[in-house]
Every structure is written in C-alpha cells, then in structure tokens.
Amino acid sequence: MTGRLWGVGLGPGDPELVTVKAARLIGAADVIAFHSARHGRSIARGVAAPYLTANQIEEHLVYPLTTETTDHPGGYQGAMDDFYADCAARLAAHLDAGRDVVVLAEGDPLFYGSYMHMHKRLADRYPCEVVPGVTSVSAAAAVLGRPLCERDEILTVLPGTLPPDVLAERLRETDAAAVMKLGRTFANVREAFELAGRADEAWYVERATTDAQRTAPLNEVDPDDVPYFSLALLPSPINNTFTPPTTKTAAEGSVTVVGLGPAGPEWMTPEVRAAIASADDVIGYTTYVDRLPDRARQRKHGSDNRVESERAAFALDLARKGSNVVVVSSGDPGVFAMASAVTEVASEPEYSDIAVRVLPGMTAAQAVASRVGAPLGHDYCVLSLSDRLKPWDVIAQRLTAAAAADLAIAIYNPASKSRTWQVAATRDLLLEHRSPGTPVVIGRDVGGPEEAIIVTTLAELDAQSVDMRCLLLIGSSQTRTVPRPDGPLVFTPRRYPATVSEDTPGAG
C-alpha cells in the first residue's frame, strides 16, 4: 500500500496556534517535508519543531532561487517548475514505499503556499488530505484588534507584486483589504495606498504572533526594513477611529552565541542557521563573519580576533537597545571561543536583564577525528597551546598531567606567526610519558579547500608542518594506527586494559 500525503497548515508562526489535528499528524508522520531558501532556514520547520519526533525522515526542499535571475532556458518559471517536479518525485518515492508524508506549510496550505505545488502534482496519484491553518491575514487582524470586515463589506486579498496603479484601483473598489508579499514590493504597495487615498487607514503587520512581531501605521514604516513575511492591512471601515493600543511590539533584545562548525555551511546545524537568519546583527571575528551571506536588514560587524571581551560587550549593548544579536564562532562556541567571553561579560550586573543563550556546533577536534576514524574513541582532553591568556608553565603542567593520565589529547591553537616553538616543546614533553610510536594526527583546514590530513608518530612530529589552521590529535597508549588502501585508520579502543605495563604496545 502507498503512503498518505498530508498538506498541514501551521498557522502564522506561534507554535500554540498549530491545530490539534496538525500537531497529531506531524508527530505521527514517517516523513516531514518543508521548504526553505538557500540560507537553509525554514520557518515552517521552526514552528513545527515542538511536535517533531527523533525517528522521522526530514525532506528539506531548498528553492534554487527566490528573487534572483537564472540562466535556466525556461527562465524563472521554468527553474521553479523543474524544482517542484523534483520535489514531487522525492515525496512520491516515500509514498510509493508506504510512508506517510506531511508537507509543512506556514499559514494555510492552499493560501499563497508552496504546498499547493505538491498538491497539484501528487493529489491525483495518492491518498491526500489538506489540514487548514490560521492565515496571516486573520493573525494580523487579531494582533491589531481590528475587525477584517462586517455586515455586507467586501474583503479583498491582493498580492503586492501587482503594479501600483492596478493595486490602487482594487483598493479603491473594496471595503477592506490585505496585501501580501511585501518585502521588496513595499514601496510600490505604499504608493498604491497613497494613489487610492487610503494610506491613512492602513496598517503594517510583520511576523504576526511570533516573538519578532511588529505593527505600525503603514505610512510610518521604513521601506528598507520590511521582510517578506509581512502584510499591509486595510481593516473594516466601520469604527475605523479605533487605534490599536500599541504601534510596535518587538521582542526584547537578546544575544545568541553560535558555532558555525569547522568549515562551510554543510557543517552548520539547522538550529544555528535559523538563529543567524533571524538576527538583526551578526558579530564575530572577521574571517568567520565573512563566511555568512549578506542579508537585507541584517548588519554584520567583523573585528580582530583578539578583542573577545570588547566584542561581547558590543553585542550585549546592541541587545540592550532591542537588537537580536548573534555572535559567531568557528567550531563550537564553548571550546576556546566566544561563549566564555560573552557569558563572562553578561554576568556583570548591568547586563543582568539581557537574555543570553549558546547554540553548539561541530568542533574542530570531532571533524579532524572523523577523517581518520576514532582517535578520540575513549577518554580524552582538550588543550590550547596559546599562551596569550595563560602562561606556558600552566600549559606544560596540564600537558604533563594529561600524559600521565594516559588521555588522548586534542590540541588547539598549536602555533601562530608569533608562536613557533610550542609544538616542538609539547612533543618533547609528551615523549617523557608516551612511546615514540604514539599516533599523531595533524588536521589542517578540515572541510575547507586546503584540507590536509597527516598521520604520523609522536617522535616524527615535524613542528614546522604545523600552523594556526591545524589541530593536533595525540593518541593515548592504546591508540592504534592500521594501514589501509584508502589511508590509515586511527582509533582508540573503547575498552581500557586492567593494567598498562611497560610491555604494552605504545605505553610510555
């Protein structure tokens, strides 16, 4: 038997506005499908997240383009038609295998939604049901506290992509209206309201029912500060002297510290992608900030790698003014990165009211280890050779303690232009406790265009081959290197022997 296709409306953004039926179907589905632009952030998945389960298959349907041009022979529409055909084929494969598929849709699935493209291609071939959701139009009226229409009034829903003169004519003819698809069209939309003589009646609503909700009179909105997920509302003219109690409801500022992973976007978690995409300001070391695409309305602040405390204070000051700030780090933010700096500064009394959270990322140690097998498969420790924030004597003591405890060691920041002797000193110190044949892995630019992995031994470790872009993994007495045709396999067994004697291979 084939699976069943569900088009599930999630409502305007507040997860509590997901219907009981939608929540039940999401939790029971074998496959969850959702759309996003190329930045990877899916609003639909974010709304549905509380109802997802760990064992579900996720089909991430990434648009090939949004507003940009394309060299596709069929133009923009041809590129999108091919995309929807491919998406339908992916979902059909699951349905043919007997899996139930839920396609997530913001608002209502059949109201300006991407789901309808799947419905047109699949509903005549498979059992299919659409679950309606609260539309953004209803949500906008609710947050404004203004009726959409009363008695015999006519409500017109219009796309903001219409030419201003056409849009103005429709606005003159109707009692109430909702204009969708703003963003880049906002200037034309406001012009249309002015041409229709109705600009003073109109309201702007952004991300209704979410923490980032914003409302304002339409004629007070900056055209450069309008996202796609917003609309212009012309409420019922009856009792139109009513003014909403507030013209702006924005979330309080916050700081989120995130890990980008060790290299490109494929190493980044969906949670981190979503946080970055929704940020007003992005702060970090210039090299890491430059990894991220430029986004409209988002400000990027790159700085030197040696001003962590100043960077943290800057982020918190922006948050205190109402900005949602993301501070980026490479790898995981809690491993020799910005999480410590931000939380330290945030602990000061003046920042006690600023929300701070930390989102994890793939560490460089995990990335390097994965390239050769499992050298960190047993107990290990993580050390930095940088003596900028702690003296070398402390580093040497910790290296000695880790070596004496027979821990595998992941070494960050092994060298720089100004620090050229620490790697050799580390090698010599460890050789006092470890066998010369102890496996060593040198990982450079893992995940990047200059990735290189060297598997050597402690005695043969060439300090000249190590720079700041490298990470070292030093094995324990139990770590093994196994030659293989596709490259050496390095691993540390999960079980540790009852005793480690001088006769144990690799023992110090």
Image: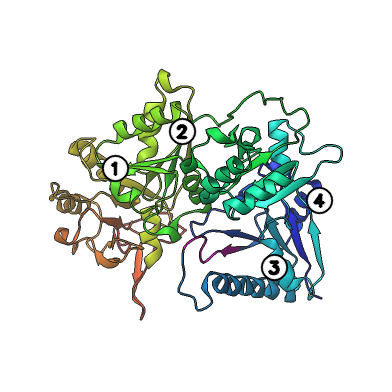
Q: Earlier in the sequence, mark 1 or mark 2?
A: 2
Q: Amino acid at mark 2?
A: Ser
Q: CA distance from mark 4 to mark 2?
A: 36 Å
Q: Is residue 22 above or below residue 118?
A: above
- Residue under label 2, please give it: 323
Task: Judge whether residue 45 can be spotted in this image.
Answer: no
Residue 42: x, y in percent?
58, 53
- Residue depicted at x 57% and y 48%: 182
The reply to whether dot 1 and dot 4 touch (C-beta < 8 Å) is no
In front here: 391 or 175? 175
Amino acid bearing label 4 = Lys
Query: Which label belongs to residue 357?
Result: none
- Amino acid, disc 3: Met
Residue 54 on the magenta span: no
In front of the other: 189 or 407: 189
**Residue appearing at x 25%, y 56% in the figure:** 469
Magenta residues, start to end:
60-68
Question: In what element is the residue under mark 1?
Answer: helix
> Mark on residue 21?
4
